[in-house]
Image: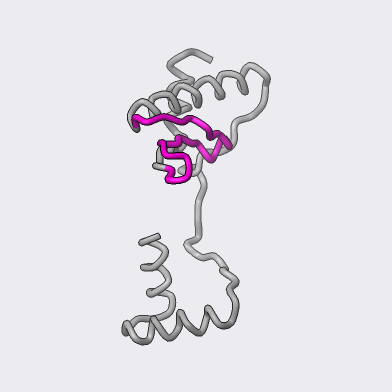
Amino acid sequence: MTRKQIKEQAARYAKFVEWSDEDQCFIGRCPELALGGVHGSDEAKVYAELCEVVEEWIELLHRDGVPLPDPLAAKSFSGKFVLRVEPAIHRRLAAKALAAGESLNSYCVKTLVKA
């Protein structure tokens, strides 16, 4: 696999850099490859390092003949999932949705988007 192919493959995977109050630094991760642990005080530098780590990981997996997992963007989603909650939480969400003049589904979607 050429360097260009590795970079193209790496670009297909989601990479996240978030501030951690617990660690007091930025943490970079690539959950599709189960990578994490890139830390630092500069968000852009953490992202750049994370990109390098993802490329190195892809190169190692390719060298070892291990197939790469499908990137999240390549997977299809129905838009439906079942969420099990305690009856009291269900009741409270239904009441909040009613008070907001929304369906329970609409209220939950808006709440999840905010999270």
Q: Position of residue 78 (x, y in %)?
A: 50, 60
Q: Position of residue 15 (x, y in %)?
A: 44, 36
Q: Is residue 23 left or right of residue 83?
A: left
Is residue 41 found inside the magenta-colored segment of the image? Answer: yes
At horizontal 55% and vertical 82% (from top left) the residue drawn is 88
At horizontal 41% and vertical 36% (from top left) the residue drawn is 25
Q: Position of residue 114 (x, y in %)?
A: 36, 61
Q: Is residue 26 left or right of residue 1?
A: left
Q: Nearer the viewer, residue 42 or 4?
A: 42
The quadrant in which residue 94 appears is bottom left
User: What is the quadrant of the C terminus in the image?
Assistant: bottom left
Q: Which residues are magenta?
A: 20-42
The quadrant in which residue 110 appears is bottom left
Residue 107 in the image: above or below residue 22: below
Q: What's the colour scheme?
A: one colour
Is residue 58 found inside the magenta-colored segment of the image? Answer: no
| Outermost top residue | 2
Q: Nearer the viewer, residue 47 or 27?
A: 27
User: What is the quadrant of the N terminus in the image?
Assistant: top right
At horizontal 43% and vertical 26% (from top left) the residue drawn is 51
At horizontal 44% and vertical 22% (from top left) the residue drawn is 7
Q: Nearer the viewer, residue 102 or 115?
A: 115
Q: How many marks?
A: 0
Q: Position of residue 95 (x, y in %)?
A: 42, 86
